[in-house]
Image: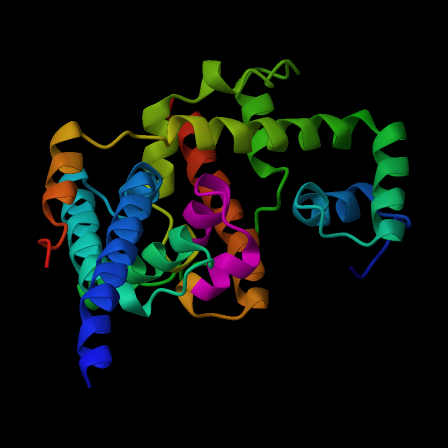
Amino acid sequence: MGGGFGECSCEHCEEVMQPYLDRELTAEEHAEAEAHLDSCGYCRKRYEFESELRVYVKKVCQEEMSPELKAKLVALRLPEP
Amino acid sequence: MDEERASEPRELAAEARDRVRFEEEALELSDQVYRVARRLVSSREEAEDLVQETYARAFRSWQSYTPGTNMRAWLLRILTNLNIDRGRRLQRQPDPQPLEEGDYFLYNRMEQAAGGRTDVERIDDRLSQDDIVGALSAVPHDFRDVIVLVDIGDFTYADAAQILDIPVGTVMSRLHRGRRILKRELAEKVGES
């Protein structure tokens, strides 16, 4: 990732949030982000929020299939030869 | 010749066994396939049709599946191709608006809506299931597909790339942008409430 944790470190931290949570940063970039998060409550809160948001989105987007559909799928099996 | 003829029933029986095994394995995955399908399309009926078509096609072409490979990804590849064939993807164009909001945008908006209080971490108090589902369905298809596969279906980037027949880098960029679009949509809902 370009930029780095220079003068605009919170801006950069926002930029690397997704690759950080996806574990896509290099070890060095990850360590830089960790160091910033350790000292910056502003960014840390927003990272925790993003992480919880992903869990919540996944949870509420689950919808189970109906038993009727399941029975229809079973009925689609090819007949025995 | 006699030996050849005698081996035919054995081969047929082995093939029938392989097919039954394939069908059973595919059916075991149907709940997971449906959960992804449901979020790729906008209604339960569409999702049910799509899953039925997918399984009908999968059962017909079971011999093109390579045993030992990821069957869930194989089924989802059929499903997403059918979805594209049906033209559902054309219902919405890719998001034409420039996306200026960053990844902190939703949190900042929620904090603002909470009157400066900083306890906005209670996401479920602020955003309902309908808000989330509605916001996700408002994300253009190209971006929504990758969010659904990776964030809801738990597919790896590589699997999502294979399913959608796009490079891994495109999966990553669409996921990054798609999540931001999703948060922008959610921020609008926070503003409405």
Q: Give the dominant element type of the magenta stretch: helix, strand or loop.
A: helix
Nearest the viewer among B131 and B7 is B7
Does the segment drawn in magenta span residue A59? Answer: no
Which percent across, then down, holds residue B78? Answer: 29, 61
What count of labels does the image hold? 0
Q: Residue B184 or B173: which is nearer the viewer?
A: B173
Q: In which quarter of the image is residue A50?
A: top right
Left or right, A39 with respect to A11, comes to right
Q: Which residue is drawn at 16% across and 43% down?
A: A73
Farthest-out residue, bottom: B1
Locate residue B79, reporting x and y percent: 28, 57
Classify the position of the C terminus of chain B by image quarter.
top left
Residue range in magenta is B145-162
Q: Which residue is drawn at 69% across and 32% down?
A: A47
Instruction: Assess whether residue B159 is covered by the magenta stretch.
Output: yes
Question: What residue do we see at 62% from left, 42% from top?
Answer: B103
Indicate left or right for B132 with B98 as reference: left
State the residue lying farthest toward the front: B2
